[in-house]
Amino acid sequence: MLPLYSVCVVAILSGFLGIVPEWLQVESLVDRR
């Protein structure tokens, strides 16, 4: 069984990697206008 902190780190990283591409898309859309 994995330690609790490693599970938290993986969850945070996966959430961060899920948010960043969307944020970059929004930034690029704003720059085009």
Image (cartoon, rainbow, N blue to C red):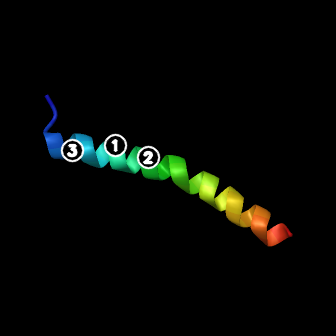
Marks 1 and 3 in Cβ contact (< 8 Å): no
Query: Circle 1 is placed at which residue position?
Result: 11
Cα distance in 3D space between marks 1 and 3: 9 Å
- Checking the image for residue 15, the label placed there is 2
Q: Where does the image place residue 14, in percent across and percent down from the top left?
A: 42, 44
Marks 2 and 1 in Cβ contact (< 8 Å): yes
Element type where label 3 sits in the image:
helix
What residue is drawn where x is 69% and y is 65%? 27
Q: Quadrant of the N terminus?
A: top left
What residue is drawn where x is 64% and y is 60%? 24
Say which of 33 and 4 sits in front.
33
Query: Circle 3 is placed at which residue position?
Result: 6
Lower position in the chain sequence, tag 2 or tag 3: 3
Cα distance in 3D space between marks 2 and 3: 14 Å
Which three-letter amino acid code belongs to the residue tagged 2? Answer: Gly
Q: Where does the image place residue 29, in percent across and percent down from the top left?
A: 78, 62
Which three-letter amino acid code belongs to the residue tagged 3? Answer: Ser
Which of the two discs, 2 and 3, sits closer to the camera? 2
Lower position in the chain sequence, tag 1 or tag 3: 3
Residue extending furthest top?
A: 1
Element type where label 1 sits in the image:
helix
Q: Where does the image place residue 4, in percent across and percent down from the top left?
A: 15, 40
